[in-house]
Amino acid sequence: MDNYPSAPNANPIEETATDYLQMHRIPELFHNLSASIVYNRPDDPKGFMVDYLEQLKKARATGLPFPALVQDTDLTSVFRMLDPVGLGYITYSQYASTMEALGITKYNTAPTGKDKDQISSETFCQEAKKRLNELNATFFVQ
């Protein structure tokens, strides 16, 4: 018989707090906010955080894009690096691995062009932008 200690009983208050934070995507909000602060290195980080949250609130209310580190031009540049000879497409394997490298774990696994193993720049950029927007939204969507 193995003599392993049993796992401690979960604290119901901690579980409730964790569930609440997860439901409202607070960890993602802090991750995105922290990443943006480190990337931009503002002179007034607290003011930057307020501005960031105001942009997020405005985007939520108006449907405008959410604050994001990765812009459309960045996605185009990524595609060009994956297609250095300019064929106009990348393989599905390149598409999938790049989505994961961008932190996108939930993406369209059957994008246009998968059947021919030729994912176009338009498809790649649209899918990445859509999924990054979902990640950057950082609020609970019902």
Image (spheres, rainbow, N blue to C red):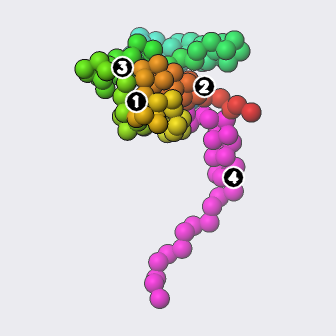
Between circles 2 and 4, the one closer to the viewer is 2
SS class, disc 1 = loop
Residue count near mark 1 (Cα–Cα under 10 Å), binned few <14, some 14–19, many ≥20: many
Residue count near mark 2 (Cα–Cα under 10 Å), binned few <14, some 14–19, many ≥20: many
Residue count near mark 4 (Cα–Cα under 10 Å), binned few <14, some 14–19, many ≥20: few
Q: Write the residue at 42% across / 20% down.
A: 121
SS class, disc 3 = loop
State the CA–CA distance, disc 3 to disc 2. 30 Å
* First in sequence: mark 4 vs mark 1: 4
Residue 118: mark: 1
Residue for badge 3? 88
Residue 13: mark: 4
* First in sequence: mark 3 vs mark 4: 4
Q: Amino acid at mark 2?
A: Ala
Q: Amino acid at mark 4?
A: Ile
* First in sequence: mark 2 vs mark 1: 1
Residue for badge 2? 137
Q: Amino acid at mark 1?
A: Gln
* First in sequence: mark 2 vs mark 4: 4
Task: Report the span colored magenta.
Answer: 1-28
State the CA–CA distance, disc 2 to disc 4. 27 Å
